[in-house]
Image (spheres, grey):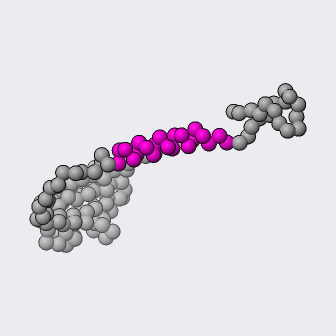
Amino acid sequence: MAAKLSSGGGGKYQIEANSEINVTPFVDVMLVLLIIFMVAAPLATVSVPVELPIAVAKPAPNPPKPVYISIQNDGDVFVGDFRTDVGSLGQDLTDQIGSRNPADERIFIRGDQNVRYGDFMQVMNALQDNGFYSVALVGEDQSTQ
């Protein structure tokens, strides 16, 4: 904080606080940063000439839309948003994935935390019986709460 030691209308020993902002240190820091960036900018460029080959890799196809099976507390089973039962689960999944290979598909299972273990195992057995071997269980993320 700066202070004025004398002013136009005051006495010799009257001290007032100076409320003006001193920008000299700010300007000094900014000039130093400007010089650093001016010196460092040419070092960031690559000066070695290289003739790069043409890229021949084909773009990767987008992954298919994931398939979700939901099991509610009362045992109701859904494929996506459509209700199904364990007996027709395999056919409904095959209809949803189309011509893709069931062994290569990853099926995501969302089960209510209070679902009976027997209901869950019926769904898992139906998946295995119809050739769906890659299964992922979906849970709620507690890390952000």
Image quadrant where residue 35 sits: top left
Q: Picture coordinates of residue 56 (x, y %)? A: 11, 65
Residue 2 appears anywhere in the view: yes
In the figure, is residue 86 to the left or right of 110? left
In the figure, is residue 108 to the left or right of 5? left
137 within the magenta span: no
The quarter of the rendered structure image containing the N terminus is top right
Q: Quick check: 17 above or below 113?
A: above
Closer to the camera in the image, 112 or 55: 55
35 within the magenta span: yes
Magenta-highlighted stretch: main secondary structure?
Answer: helix
Q: Picture coordinates of residue 131 (x, y %)? A: 12, 61
Q: Residue at x 22, y 71 (%)?
A: 96
Residue 102 appears anywhere in the view: no
Count of labels shown?
Answer: 0
Q: Residue at x 27, y 56 (%)?
A: 109
Q: Quick check: 63 above or below 38?
A: below
**Span colored in magenta:** 21-41
In the figure, is residue 19 to the left or right of 108? right
Q: Residue at x 51, y 44 (%)?
A: 30
Q: Quick check: 64 above or below 119?
A: below
Q: Picture coordinates of residue 108 (x, y %)? A: 26, 57
Image quadrant where residue 2 sits: top right
Q: Residue at x 28, y 62 (%)?
A: 68
Closer to the camera in the image, 76 or 111: 111
